[in-house]
Amino acid sequence: MADNWVDVLKAGWGSVHDNFFELGGHSLLTTQTASGVQMALQLDVPLRAMFECNTVAELAEYVQGLQGSALDDDKVDRLSDLMAELEGL
């Protein structure tokens, strides 16, 4: 994720706590960064998250939350069972 920020910003970057916008980031670069992050992580990261998470550290924490809420096969099975139960009521 940090590599993506460095590539897009073309600036000296030193810390996961450096602010994207203070390093010269703007809305067009935010879009490019979001696309790169999504491709690298194979995860749908909303564009608004890029504006809300101004540092790599903040974005990493946000992404961990997304990964924790992702549906896996067990969750899908439990949801299917619950839906079947609800339909039977």
Image (spheres, grey):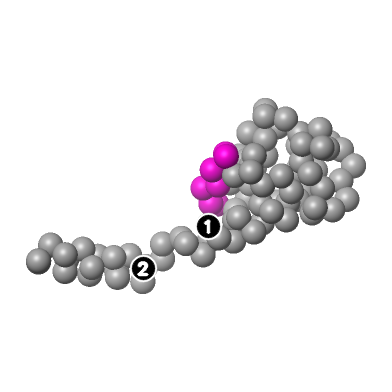
Going from N to C along the chain, the mark reached first, 2 or 1, is 1
Instruction: Identify the residue at image location x=66%, y=56%.
Output: 60
Task: Give the residue type that dot 2 points to.
Answer: Lys
**Region of the chain picked out in magenta, as a range:** 42-48
Give x and y (percent) for residue 56.
Answer: 73, 51
Up/down of 29 relative to 1, above or below: above
Q: Check the image and report above or below for 13 versus 85.
A: above
Q: Is residue 73 magenta?
A: no
Q: Which residue is mark 2?
A: 75
Residue 6, horizontal then vertical, whole percent: 80, 43
Q: Is residue 76 above or below residue 45?
A: below
User: Left or right: where does residue 23 sit relative to residue 41?
Assistant: right
* Residue 63 seen anywhere in this rendered image of the structure: yes
Which quadrant: the C terminus?
Answer: bottom left
Residue 22's quadrant in the figure?
A: top right
- Which residue is found at the position 71% from the left and 44% from the top? 54
Counting from the top left corner in percent of width and height, residue 57 is at 73, 56
Q: Which residue is mark 1?
A: 66
Quick one: label 1, few (<14), some, or many (20+) residues within 10 Å?
some
Q: Position of residue 71 (x, y in %)?
A: 41, 62
What residue do we see at 63% from left, 33% from top?
31
Q: Residue 15 or 77: which is nearer the viewer?
A: 15
- Give the residue type that dot 1 points to: Leu
Q: Is residue 32 visible?
A: no
Q: Residue at x 60, y 55 (%)?
A: 62
Q: Main secondary structure of the magenta part?
A: loop
Circle 1: element type: helix
Numbered circles on residues, count: 2
Q: Residues within 10 Å of mark 2 (few under 14, many from 20)?
A: few
